[in-house]
Amino acid sequence: MAVTSPPKLDARKLRADFPIFKQQIHGKPLAYLDSAVSTHKPRQVLEKLKDFYETSYANVHRGVYTLSERSTAEYEGARQKLAQFVNAPSDREIVFVRGATEGLNLVAYAWGLVNLGPGDVVVVTELEHHSNFVPWQYIAGRTGATLKMIELDDNGELDLSALDSIAREGRVKVVANNLVSNALGTINPIEKLSAWAHEQGAIMVVDAAQAAPHHEIDVQQLDCDFLAFSSHKMCGPTSVGALWGRAELLESMAPFNLGGHMIRSVRLEETTWGDLPYKFEAGTQPIAEAVGFGAAMDYVNEVGLEAIEQYESELVAYTLDRFAELGGITSYGPPPERRAGIVSFNVEGIHPHDVAQVLDSEGVAIRAGHHCCQPLMTRLGVAATNRASYYLYSVPDEIDRLIEGLHKVRKILG
Ligand SMILES: Cc1ncc(COP(=O)(O)O)c(C=O)c1O
C-alpha cells in the first residue's frame, strides 16, 4: 500500500456517514470515483434537510410569523457560514445562486454586458470549464470585446509568459480562471493573475467550483473580485451555490434576474432595487438547499480542508504509482503536490467510454468524456479522457478496484 504518511483524515470512518455506500452496484460494493462531477451527501446533511422541512420550513423574508422568522434565520445563518468559509469581508457580499454556472453567468451578464465593448479584452484560459468560458465568449461577442486565452504548458499548467502579448491586444477588462481545474486538477496561480488583472484595470473572476471542496479559500488573500462555487460538489444539496463579489462592484451592477423580493419599490414609471444581496435573489430561493449547504460547510470544516487536500494528494500519488505499474496509461496534469484529487487518463488504444462501461460492470464509477472542457481536449489532442476524482470518503481500495477493472478492460477490449 503506497499511501504512506498517516493521513490526518480517516476516510473509512467518514465513509460510514454516507448512506449511498451501503448499496452494491452489479453485485459489487460501490467504488465511486466521480466526486468532481458531484459528491455524495453525509447523513448529517440529509438529516438537516429533513429536520428543516419538518420543523422550520417557510418562505424567507416574507412573513412576520414565527415559522418564517425561523426559516429566515436558518437561511441567513447559512449565508454567514459561506461568508466565513471564503473569508468575505461581509455577509451581504454572498449571493445565493443555483450553482457556480449561474454565479458566473450573473457576472458575465450583469457586469459584462454593461462594462465591455470594442477594444476591450476578456481573458480566459485553456483550462476553463465551459461555465467560465462560454458565458465570456458569448458576452464578448455581444459587446464587440475580444476573447483571448492563456494557454497551457506541457505540465498542464498555465503559461503566464503570454500575458504581456495579451495586454498588447487591447484594454484587458476581465480575467476569468478556475482556481482548480476539473479536468486536470491543476491548482492555478490566482493571486498572480489577480495582481496582473488589477494592473491592467481588469476584474478577476474566479471559478471555485472545484476548489472550494478541497482547498482553503480566502477571497481577500486571492484579491479577486468575484468567486463562484456550488454546494453539490462539497457534500451539499444540488441547485444551490454561492457567488461572492466585492460589495462596491455588486452595488454598481444592475440585477441579473427580475421579479419578487429583489426590489425596493415598484411603480409604473420605475422600479428600484433592494439592498445587497437581495437585489440578486429574485423569486423564491432554494431555501432548504441553502440550509443544507450550511450543514455541508459544517461537515467539511469539521474534517478540515488542509486534511482533505493532503489526503487527496496522497490518493493521486498512489493512483499514478499504480498506473506506472500497470503501464499503457497516458495520464494528464501536473505532479500530485500541485493538483487536487483528480486524475485524467487514457488507456492506450481504448475509447474512454468503453473503459468506463467495463468499469461500471465492476461497480467502479468514473467519468469519461470531455469534462465540459473542449478547448482543453483540443490542446491535449484527444476527444475525451477518463477521469477518476476523489473526495474525503474515497479510500485506496477503490483505486485498487479501478486498477483491477483496468486489467479487465484490457482483457476484454485490448
Ligand atoms: C471547474 C468547474 N466550474 C464550473 C462548474 C459548474 O458547476 P455547476 O454545474 O455546479 O454549476 C463545474 C462543474 O463540473 C466545474 O467543475
Image: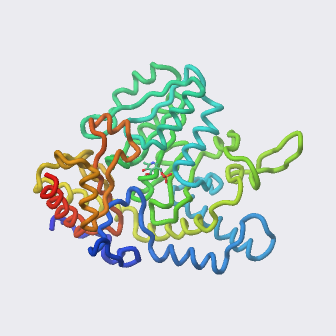
Q: Left or right: where does residue 100 sit relative to residue 20?
A: right
User: Between residues 96 and 89, which one lies in front from this camera angle?
Assistant: 96
Q: Left or right: where does residue 135 sit relative to residue 360?
A: right
User: Between residues 185 and 102, which one lies in front from this camera angle?
Assistant: 102
For the question of whether residue 393 can be seen, the reply is yes
User: Between residues 218 and 151, which one lies in front from this camera angle?
Assistant: 151
Percent position (x, y) of residue 241?
Answer: 55, 56
19 lies above or below 340: below
The residue that appears at 28% across and 58% down in the rendered structure is: 357
- Tell me the quadrant of the picture where the N terminus can be found: bottom left
Q: Left or right: where does residue 57 sit relative to residue 100?
A: right
Percent position (x, y) of residue 57?
Answer: 67, 74
The residue that appears at 24% across and 60% down in the rendered structure is: 358
268 lies above or below 138: below
Percent position (x, y) of residue 92?
Answer: 65, 54
The residue that appears at 19% across and 49% down in the rendered structure is: 347
